[in-house]
Structure formats: C-alpha cells, structure tokens
Image: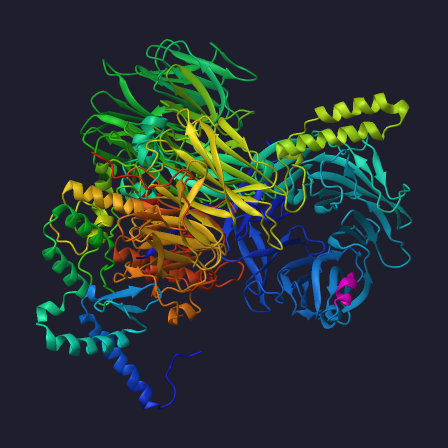
Amino acid sequence: MFLYNLTLQRATGISFAIHGNFSGTKQQEIVVSRGKILELLRPDPNTGKVHTLLTVEVFGVIRSLMAFRLTGGTKDYIVVGSDSGRIVILEYQPSKNMFEKIHQETFGKSGCRRIVPGQFLAVDPKGRAVMISAIEKQKLVYILNRDAAARLTISSPLEAHKANTLVYHVVGVDVGFENPMFACLEMDYEEADNDPTGEAAANTQQTLTFYELDLGLNHVVRKYSEPLEEHGNFLITVPGGSDGPSGVLICSENYITYKNFGDQPDIRCPIPRRRNDLDDPERGMIFVCSATHKTKSMFFFLAQTEQGDIFKITLETDEDMVTEIRLKYFDTVPVAAAMCVLKTGFLFVASEFGNHYLYQIAHLGDDDEEPEFSSAMPLEEGDTFFFQPRPLKNLVLVDELDSLSPILFCQETGVMAVYPQYSHVRLCYSRLHCSAERIADLANEDTPQLYVACGRGPRSSLRVLRHGLEVSEMAVSELPGNPNAVWTVRRHIEDEFDAYIIVSFVNATLVLSIGETVEEVTDSGFLGTTPTLSCSLLGDDALVQVYPDGIRHIRADKRVNEWKTPGKKTIVKCAVNQRQVVIALTGGELVYFEMDPSGQLNEYTERKEMSADVVCMSLANVPPGEQRSRFLAVGLVDNTVRIISLDPSDCLQPLSMQALPAQPESLCIVEMGGTEKQDELGERGSIGFLYLNIGLQNGVLLRTVLDPVTGDLSDTRTRYLGSRPVKLFRVRMQGQEAVLAMSSRSWLSYSYQSRFHLTPLSYETLEFASGFASEQCPEGIVAISTNTLRILALEKLGAVFNQVAFPLQYTPRKFVIHPESNNLIIIETDHNAYTEATKAQRKQQMAEEMVEAAGEDERELAAEMAAAFLNENLPESIFGAPKAGNGQWASVIRVMNPIQGNTLDLVQLEQNEAAFSVAVCRFSNTGEDWYVLVGVAKDLILNPRSVAGGFVYTYKLVNNGEKLEFLHKTPVEEVPAAIAPFQGRVLIGVGKLLRVYDLGKKKLLRKCENKHIANYISGIQTIGHRVIVSDVQESFIWVRYKRNENQLIIFADDTYPRWVTTASLLDYDTVAGADKFGNICVVRLPPNTNDEVDEDPTGNKALWDRGLLNGASQKAEVIMNYHVGETVLSLQKTTLIPGGSESLVYTTLSGGIGILVPFTSHEDHDFFQHVEMHLRSEHPPLCGRDHLSFRSYYFPVKNVIDGDLCEQFNSMEPNKQKNVSEELDRTPPEVSKKLEDIRTRYAF
Amino acid sequence: MSFKREGDDWSQLNVLKKRRVGDLLASYIPEDEALMLRDGRFACAICPHRPVLDTLAMLTAHRAGLQLFYGKKQPGKERKQNPKHQNELRREETKAEAPLLTQTRLITQSALHRAPHYNSCCRRKYRPEAPGPSVSLSPMPPSEVKLQSGKISREPEPAAGPQAEESATVSAPAPMSPTRRRALDHYLTLRSSGWIPDGRGRWVKDENVEFDSDEEEPPDLPLD
C-alpha cells in the first residue's frame, strides 16, 4: 500500500505573530506562524479585512519568529528559529509573492532539543544583532550588517553560553546606539543540582541577566545579573535612546516590575484583579502576552492577563528615570497567543484557541471614567487593585478569521443520513459507500459534511464544515417578473465602481443606477423596450448595448449611434469587451466591430460565415497597452469550439479548433495564474496565462490553455460541475480575473496563491451573474435567482470549507451519532472549571459575604451591590470562565440536532465528575432500545495522578432520540476512558482493564475481564470477534473474545511504543492509528496470524511475557509511517466527494484537515515518488529542516509520498519547474495537471 | 548496535540451524493436534493432560515421543483421533438406550470442546472467525450482515455464525437442526454471561462475574 498525503485545510491556530513592513512599502503586514506554516497577512486599512497574501509550509517546527529592520532601512526581515538547528533570515519579495531565504546559518543538531538554540529569539531594536537561545545553556549572537551593495550580511556566531542555566525569556534591550544589549530571564540550577538535601533547590532564584555585545571587541559579555523576587514569565522591552527611558518590564505572578541599569530604582506595581471574581483568590495573576505601540512622541504597552483583560501600561518618567508605572483597564478580548498593534490603529489578536480577531482601536482610553492604577499608590504587600470588566469600549471588532484550532474530534457524516440504522458500525461507512448525493436529497446539499468539535472551554463550538465558499449576501431585491440576464457597467474606464446595473427581461430592459441606494433610471441612454444580449463600457467613457435587432453605441455626451441588423436577421449571440464587439447573426454569420481612436465603432469590411449555428462566443479582455484582444472563441452547434483571429493581418481567419464531447453552452476567456497585477511600487508583475473555459450542456467544465501567440488550445482539464448546462461569467476576485460557473450549483474558478481553485459556492442555484463593484462591496457579484436580484460577496477565498458554528459550554471531548435520529450526543469536559451549580452557589456565597462584611449603615448599599453582582452576566466566551483550581472538573452531556444546532437535552454532571467516553448502543437482552453510556472519572488529579474512581452512567434514549433518561450509574475503580458496543453488550476500558459489561437492572454487570493491557486503554475498536485496544503508550493490542470460555485473550500486538490518540479500522486485519507526537501509522496483522490462542494454564512466564516488546507472541507489521507534524485527534475512512474514491481523513489539534489517499497504479506512485525526490533537492524547505528527516521525525517515513511538498512544484520558479519536469520526461503543465488530478479524484 | 553474528561458536549455530529445521518441519503438525497459547507456547492436544511446551522444537520432540507410543499400538488412522474423541464415540455407542440424554450430553460436550484450530504453522484453510458479525453483535437485520461480511470473508461460511462454528468444531459439517442450534446458542449465551456448568447438569455462577441481585437461576432455553 502506498499513500499520498494531501492537506485539505491548513492549520488555523497561530503560535506567533509579528508585524512589520515586510514588502518594503508603507503598509504594515503581519507574519504568523501556524506551527509548520508561515503566512503573510495584510489587513486592508480601508475595508478592515485581513487578506492572506502568502502561505508556505516549511516542513519544520517554527519555535520563534522575529521581525527586524537594519538601521535606516525601510524593509523588515523575518528571523526564524526552528527545529532545524539553523537560523534563517527571510525576506518577502512582493513581485514574486514569495519568501526568499537570505541567510541560513547552521549551529547545531536538528530537532527540538534542550541545548540547541532556536527556542528564543531576540533582536536589537536598532537591528544590529540577533540573539538565538536554547532552553538551556546555549545562546548565540549574530551581528547583522549590510555590505557595499546594501545587502544584509550576517556574522559568524558569538557564544554567550552558560552551563547549568535555564532560560525563560530573552529580549533585546533598547539602548539606542550604544552596544546592543539583551536581557534574559534565567535560572542557575547548578547548586540545586548538587545539593541532595533539596534546600538549595528551594532557595534557587530566578535572575535577570544582561548580555552585552561589544561591537568593538566583537564578543559578548555577561554584563550584570540580579536575582528577582518573583518568578517572571516574560519580559517587555521599553523604548530607549531618544524615545524613552530604556530598560525592561518584568511580568511575573501578580506584579509587573520595571528594571534598568544605573541608579534606577525598581518600580513595581501589582496586576489588578477583577472585582468579585469567582476565581480561586489564591491563584496568582500573570500577563500572558503584550504588544508595544511606539510613535515619535509617546509609547505604551498593551498587556493581556490570562483572563483576557488588556491593560494599557504607561511609564511616567522624570529626566530618563522612571518614577511610576501606570495601568489602566483597556478592554477584554479572548486570550491571545500574540498581539500586534499596527500603525493604522488596528489591533490584531491571534487567539490561543478559536477564531482570531482584528480590532480597530477607536479610543486610547485616555479620557474616560476608568480608574488608573499606579505603582505610586500605597498598597500593602500582597494587596492589589480591583477593576470591573466590561464590554468593549476602546476597541471595535472589524474582522474575524475563522480558526478551528483545537479540533478535538471530527466525524464525516455522509452515509449516515442515508442508512441511519447501520451507521453505528463504523465499517458500514466504507462498505456501503452509497453515494453522497443521496444525502444531498435529505440535507438538500450535494456534499458530505464534517462535524467538528473544536475550541476550548467557553469558546468551544461544534462546527459543521461543508466544501464550498462562504457567500455573504449583501442585498436581495425582488424584481417585476423573471429577468434573464444582468450586467454592470462603469461610466468611465477610470472609475473604480460600477454605475449601472442592467437587467434584461424577455421583452424589456431595466436600468438601475448604483449610488447610496439602487434605483431605476431612464436617462442612461439604454434602450428599455427590448431585451438585451449584452452591454459594456466601450472605450474610455462610452457604453454599448447589444440587443436582438442591433447595436446601440452611447457616447459620453449621450449621443447615440445605432447599427441595425440587415433584413430579417437578428443577433443571436454576441461578445463584447472594452474595444471590440462581435455579433453572430441568425444563420451563423459573424460581424466584427472595433473601436477606432476617435471612439467610433467600425464594422470590419468582411463578414464570416460559420459552418454551423453559433451557440456561444467569448472575447478576452483587451490586454493593457494594446488595441485589441487577438482572439475570439466561438462555440458551434456541431460540438466544436473555434478560435478566430481578430488581428488585422488575418482578421476572422480560423486559428484552431477543438472538438468537444457535448454541445458547448458558454465560453469565457480569462487571464489567470499571474501574480498580483501591480505591486505598490507600480511594477507590473508577470502576466498570467490565457485560459479558455468551456461550459458544456452536460454539466462539464473544460479549462484549456490558449496560446497567446498562435491561438492553439492545449492542456485541457475537465471537471463535472452539476446536472445543468454550465454558464460562465467573468468576475474579479482579489484584483484578478476569475470565472463564475453555474450549473445546478455555482462554482468559482480562481487562482489563489499560485494554485487553481475550483470551489462550489455554498449558496442556492443562480441563473445569471456579473461582477459588481461599489463602495460598500468592492469585489462583489450581482446575480439573478428566479425573480430576485442578489448582490453577493465572496470574502474567504482560499478556504476549502465553509463553516457553521454552534456554541458549546465546555471543551468537547467526543461525540457519537444516534443512528436513528442523527442527533449528536456530545460530552463536554473542562478541567479547572466550575459546574453551573457550583458557580451559582459560589456567587450566592460571595454575595452573602459582601452583605455581611458591610457595616450597619452600608448594609443597604452592600445589598444593592450584591444584587447587581448576582445579576451581572458577562459572556464567558469573551471574559473566560472562572478558574476553579487544580483537580476541579465540570462536564455536561448534550444531545444536539446537528442541522439546526439546537440543544435537545443537556445533562449537567456533578462537580469533579469528568466525562471521558461516550457510546450509543443497544443491548441484546433489551431489544430495540438505544442506550447512551458515558464514562466519567471522579476527582481526577492530573499531576501527580490520582483518581477516586469512576462511573459509567447509563441513559436510555427516549422520545425519538431527543431525551436522555437516567437509568443507573455503575461505579468502577479507574477512569473509564473507552467504551465500544460489542456483540450486544459493551466493552469498557477501565484504566488498564478491559471488561465486557452487560446491562443489568441496577447497574452494568461485569461479565468478563482482561488485566493484561499495558497502561491505560485509550480506545477500543471491534470487528467480528476481534477487539483492537489502543493503549495510551503501547500502541495496539489485538484481543479475541471467546464466548464459550467467556474470556478475552490477547493474541497479537505491535512492537512500537505508540502513544495512540485515535484509531480507525481499514479492514479486518489493518488498523490506522495516530499518536500524540503527530505521527500516523497503518499496521496490519500478517496473514498467518492465529486468533485461536488459549490462555496459558501453567502460570510460568514464557519468552514473550518477559519481553520488552509487549506480551503477545504474534506481532503486527508496519505498513506505513508518516509524521504529520501536528497531533492528530481523529481518523476516519470515508469518501469526501460524490462519486470519489475512499480516503483516510485526519484532523489535527492545530485545526488542520488532511487526507491520505492510496495510489491506484504503480506508474502514478513512481511518478510522484520522483516528483517528491526532485523537489526535496530542488526546492528544500524554507526554514532549513530536511524534508525527509522531518517526515521521519519519530519513525522512518514509510510508503507515503508528501503531496504538500509535491504541490510546491506550482510555486517554484519556472526554470526550476522546467528542469524538474524534464527529468520526469514531461512538461510543467503536465506535472501540475497530474498534481491537480490526484487531488480532485479524492477531494477538493 | 548491529545484529551481525559475532564469534565462531559453531555449536550455537548448529543449535539454531536445528531449530530452524524443526520450525519448518512443524508445519506438518495438523491443526487440531496442538494449541497455540497466548504467550506463544504450545499445548499438545493429543495428550489428555495437555502438556504445555515452550517452543515449537519441544513440541516436535514431544510429538516424536508420542509417535513412538501410539505409532506402534494403533493403526495410522486411529492415531490422528484425539483420545477424547474416542472416548466420546465409545460412550455414544454404549448409551444408545437414552437418545435424548445422549444428544444433550453430546451437545454439551462438543460445545465444551476446546479444540480450536491450531494453525500458526499450518496454512489455514479458511477463517471461521472472519468478520461476519455474530448474531448478537448488533441489532442488525440479517440482510445487512450478509452485505457486510460478504466482502470480507474469503470463503462462504456456514450460516450458523462463527460462535457456533467455534464450539462445534468436532461435529460434522452437516447442517445443524434448529433445535440444536438454539440449544447451542443458549449454552453460549449462558456461558458468556458467566454461568458455568458444574458437571452435574446444573449451572453455577462464576464468582468473578456480576449478576443482577434477583438472578438466582440461569434463564431457561427459550421455547419456540
């Protein structure tokens, strides 16, 4: 078995975010790291939308990211610290839209190691040096400079190592133009290590250490070190030189402290806490991230606490001595992994979990009622300030970036809707892959859906993902009668926005003008009493309307020239662009008009008679700087498309012809695939290829490359779109041309980040469309659907899935689907959380205390305050849930309708009961009733691990699967972490015990047990008599249930220690599994495996019992190993597209979705193996990690070809593409066609 | 670390060689004459006391001894029979006067028979446990069962389902009567829910298994 790995949706969680002027223009961009992906985002200051410019997978772990700028420069560079043992400096090239590796310096071994630098990066604020540090011991400093040609240079590394020292954080101190200085939070553990009594360990203090790079002597000295009172978690640089007092802010538990060299005394201020907070008061408060904003005149910091409250921190200075730290509550946003304040007044918040946000900073919070806290205010030690959290006041949300991270569980439900009663047997999904189209009939869609449980704590949600582009409906208006067609025209070529919408009916034309509102006009010059075939802007400021009886040319001064059809002929089809008009008269006669420099529309002297009736025509847009488009495409009734030259030298001569499998319906020539049309410096980027899109009557879309010189057609790609004839419309998307194809479903074909996308719109069927640009909607679509006119916008280009989210209360752990009603039964569990009941109880208690604490005369006021406190209800999804402390758990069991997203039933478990497993099943001794079993741990403490036991709650599903009726609860000794139905009973993994339970009257009855599983059962799969148990640490164990002896006997296992997170059965002998380190494997029992083993009656330890490699005598074979790079939490074998083949779908903790697909032919495998091999050498990963060793991180990669690397072929430079494809005996388009083919065969 | 052999201890090498040959010859051990144990050891199914042998070589040696013993006394065909089988056959003949009793006893005994196929060394002929879901695996209609298993199992299997097969290995492959099958099913249901026959025709509770508090007697064979 050979597999091919494809990413459907890249990870969406963000681990780092930096901002700077990466393209070298005034505009600021954001670079984010998503684990193994580097992405460049550009927030558009006008619309407030964040656009992704570039995404690159680096095949390595990005551990740190920094932006820096050389002194006096205008462009920011990116320094990346990764697991490659190398420091890499990247530059963004806007003209090519790629990151270019400028420097790559090797300093150590690869991998995330303790003493190999890469974990921390710090740059000198003046851009003269960069420090890269390991978690322990090693620090290296590189000097950055420019050479004579103003190119960035990097020195050899200078060492600043100190043995036995742990590092917590490193920043560059702003010292102006003095020697660069770095501040580190360190801890020296040497003494503690050598003192066996543990006394030294208890007294070890963290230190703040300054390292100075002496530029004159070219070495680094450890300048000064000072023990800290509190344990710090991170540092903030304070602007220095001419901008501020220099120094650092140390963020530690409960305090923020300012420190600097010289006479500066430490300034310390407590971190304010929320008033009447339900959190454990003993719990310290820390800042988790910060952002600095600096202008010429002032600076401030925004620091966020772990509850999400942002404080604005300012420093009061007196002659460069800091006298006071001031904190002011700013606003509360979800807890961030990184924040960036942009010069345009935006705050980008990369959330730790869930969606990311872009806020506009509307106020700086300078002149409001909010109290300001200061270090100068006298407070007792241990005392702190209090503030009242409130909804946003200073920030305004402008954009939200969807993020699935973390995905905890996912299930693809195609078949379920069709054969509900069988879906509980996993096997059925694959065996009965009845097409997903039938689901469509039920759910009114023609794609399967992915149900994804994601998020954490109160920001959790259940999201339904469907393949398709999200459509935002800007306006819908009803029209008198059913229109046939719609166009938009601008008034002048320089205009940014459209002026008119022209709607054609069977016997009339309606003209609407676009302004503040859209209203009908009659003075546009268009003929209203006839249907329209096409209209367009002609030349600079004229308009043209083609209607069955003629052409109407409307000049800017409203003069009208009419051209009438000769005799009884009428115009049947036409094609129009900015300067040319071609019409087809009845009988297949083509008439060509071209605009001359005076603005006159002239007919060409000859006409051309076609051999058959014309069905459709298309003209390309006039290329910039040219007079005309040279090609006309004509589709004829005889199933052909012909390309006709419009060049004056051979005007109306046929150039090429293509035969089609069916009659064409629509044609569209577009230019796609080029990079941005124009970058900020005014340079034109490379021009894309011309593509002829042909929509056929049988619902197929063909895309063919049109040679810009000869007009030859080549490299045809085919895709079936739907059951109706395909109509094509040219629209603009992100400054480029795109094609909207309409069949029974609408699709958008566009080029995005040098890859072609053909994505369906998640919207109802449309009939006709045209591009639309207005102030509110610069890149929209105006479309017709029955008797309505709709204005639509497609904002999330590049996204594969469109998602609908339903909020949940706690982190979803697992869900099962009730096969009869299709309802989901979700278990949600949070650690460090209160249940609703405990929360209410604590609130009540606090309110009572409040009243009691008040003096006699204040009682009334206190009672009022207490009432206000009880009524206060801040949404937990923003303000966070109260943290209850270690060992406190809260859980709910929810029954949800996945289509409407409404909760049908909700069972709250008691405080400290944590649900870990759920199953829906029937018991053979109870007939047709469905039962839900939930495995719950009681008083679980994670570290050091202890548990008071567990329960299995049994509920009966009643009311057609909508209600849970509590039956009984069965106590067990350990955590029941896995439940699976098995032969009319259930298998439950209780800690390391595998048991068979049957339904009893007062509890579940234990019928059989196996005690030989190694550590902890994390999952159970069953097939026939085989039970495949996944151990948390020791991979898979195959167990056989012997009914006549009532025994569970282990007969086989795996030899690798895999920390299995999830597993899926591929067939009777084969299991696919994923582990917590980000590997996916497939293991298979050899064909001669014997299931019929017996228990050994002697009790002697045999060879296998003693072995290190688990106990069974028979071992599974590894079929495939692959390192994904992100923890995989769900695996499922399924079909993703109607009529497609099966693939193994996985989702990752970081929000990525990928598939592994089998190769069907040896040639394909051979081809892709060579592509991968060439790309490894020709296009090595960006951050310096070797691709092969990355994919073999834990186990040597076996039998998997990395499609993500292969698809980088498309983003390689053309000459390299040519080299690689020559080695493969193919042309570059052939290679990219093969890459596209394998993707579309299985997915999107 | 290398797995290359070092040294020139020819005796050890010869031992290994001998074991290898022994392993290869082991494929001549018929399936029902040895049992494979969970921990990779083997039990001889011919000897009534089921001796457990650590390796295949020891099993071969043990069998060589048996061959000497049986080989001289009995004709080749008889030798293949498990002594237990012979007992049964004998009993069957003698107690022909109470047919019902004999029948039940036979059923119980054949069900009790722990002689699954030994097949780690012999290439298996078919896989009785192929993933045909058992009758009680899940409440699926039988048509569905077929649909599911049809693709996987490599050979058609008897309609009785795998457990029946398993427990009735010694019985002839002739189709079972419905009564017999029901009795067998009932036996297995009782056995798997923790009842143990005490050898005197009564059922006792397995002390490691939990029962409902009002469950004193095993359920009777359903009448229909």
- Locate the N terminus of chain A and report the quarter of the image it occupies: bottom left
- Residue A837 vs A14, above or below: the answer is above
Where residue A606 appears, as percent x and y from the top left, is 26, 28
Which x, y percent locates residue A167? 70, 61
Residue A895, percent from left and from top: 47, 30
A1130 horizontally vs A1163: left or right: right
**For this rendering, which residue is in front, A756 or A669?**
A756
Residue B175 percent coordinates (x, y)? 12, 46
**Residue displayed at 17% across by 66% down:** B83
- The residue that appears at 54% across and 15% down in the rendered structure is A517
Q: Residue drawn at (38%, 69%), measured in percent from left and top? A: A1104
Q: Is residue A908 visible?
A: yes
A1067 vs A342, nearest the viewer: A1067
Look at the image and name its color scheme.
Answer: rainbow
Q: Can I make out residue A555 in this image?
A: no
Going by the image, does A382 lie left or right of A148? right
A180 up-or-down from A778: above or below: below
* Quarter placement of the C terminus of chain A: top left
Q: Nearer the viewer, residue B96 or A967?
A: B96
Determine whether A154 is above or below A581 in the image.
below
Q: Quadrant of residue A443?
A: top left
Q: Is residue A293 magenta?
A: no
Is residue B41 shown above or below B193?
Answer: below
Quadrant of the rendered structure where residue A174 is? bottom right
Closer-to-camera residue (A960/A345): A960
Q: Which residues are magenta?
A: A198-209
